Amino acid sequence: MNEKNGLVISSARNFERSASSEVYYALTELLGYDDVTVYPVKKISGLSLAFFEQDSVTTLELLTRLVESDPSIFRFCLKLVPFQYEMSSSLDNFEQIGSLLSSKISSEHSWKILLRRRHTQLDRKSIISSIALKIANGKVDLENPDLIIIVEVIGQWSYVGLSPFSELSLSQYVHEQEFDDFSF
């Protein structure tokens, strides 16, 4: 298990390179980050990964502010999901990450696990149980949690994050300049 900050980037099929370029530009030029790596995930359409040194939750908050001020920054990205850990996809590793995240959740916090699986045979219930059984702090709240444990399983690799929000959904920011005022 490696501590790695980054984003899982969703885009429409065949627009992975364009979405990767948008995220790379936003991170390097607009936020001034160094050592940014962004690339499409092989064999999975519409998915890319970004890696950088800065905190992924703070980065997503900064990107949210940028998008609110200028929605045209992202035209190909549909969703950005933060993560702080990269690991091989195994139930043992999910147990380890559960123990690690337990130390980051206080007894006052509520939490839930948000799992997305792609190209894996690992059972949904087994993954969630492996993580949840190791978390001794806080309480589960599926409706309105204080923290969300984000688990993105992408084949043999998994990306896990702990965040007060699960994603930045860019589809909510309509590009108003794409519509003209013409009517009949």
Image (cartoon, rainbow, N blue to C red):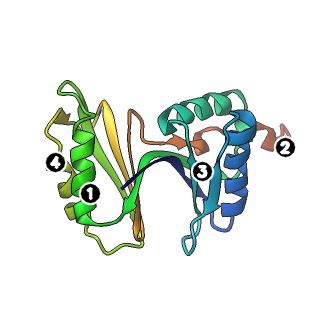
Q: Callout 4: 10 Å neighbours few (<14), some, many (20+)? A: some
Residue 128 appears in the picture as rendered: no
Image coordinates for residue 180, horizontal then vertical, percent: 83, 40
Amino acid type, label 4: Lys
Residue 21 appears in the picture as rendered: yes
Q: Callout 3: 10 Å neighbours few (<14), some, many (20+)? A: some
Image coordinates for residue 128, horizontal then vertical, percent: 23, 56
Q: Looking at the image, which is closer to me, 7 or 104?
A: 104
The quadrant of the image that shows the C terminus is top right
Taking the image as shown, residue 30 lies to the left or right of residue 167, namely right
Question: Which residue is depicted at the point 48% across and 35% down?
Answer: 57
Amino acid type, label 2: Phe
Q: Quadrant of residue 31?
A: top right
- Measure how far apart labels 3 and 4 are at the Cα level: 33 Å
Of labels 1 and 2, the one closer to you? 1
Residue bearing the label numbered 4: 134
Question: Which residue is depicted at the point 31% across and 75% down?
Answer: 121
Q: Looking at the image, which is closer to me, 133 or 169?
A: 133
Question: Which residue is depicted at the point 24% across and 28% down?
Answer: 109
Q: Looking at the image, which is closer to me, 176 or 85?
A: 85
Residue bearing the label numbered 2: 184
Mark 4 or mark 2, which is nearer the start of the sequence? Answer: 4
Which mark, residue 78?
A: 3
- Measure how far apart labels 4 and 1 are at the Cα level: 9 Å
Amino acid type, label 1: Phe
Mark 1 or mark 4, which is nearer the start of the sequence? Answer: 1
In this rendering, is residue 129 above or below 168? Answer: below
Of labels 3 and 4, the one closer to you? 4
Residue bearing the label numbered 1: 94
Taking the image as shown, residue 62 lies to the left or right of residue 112, namely right
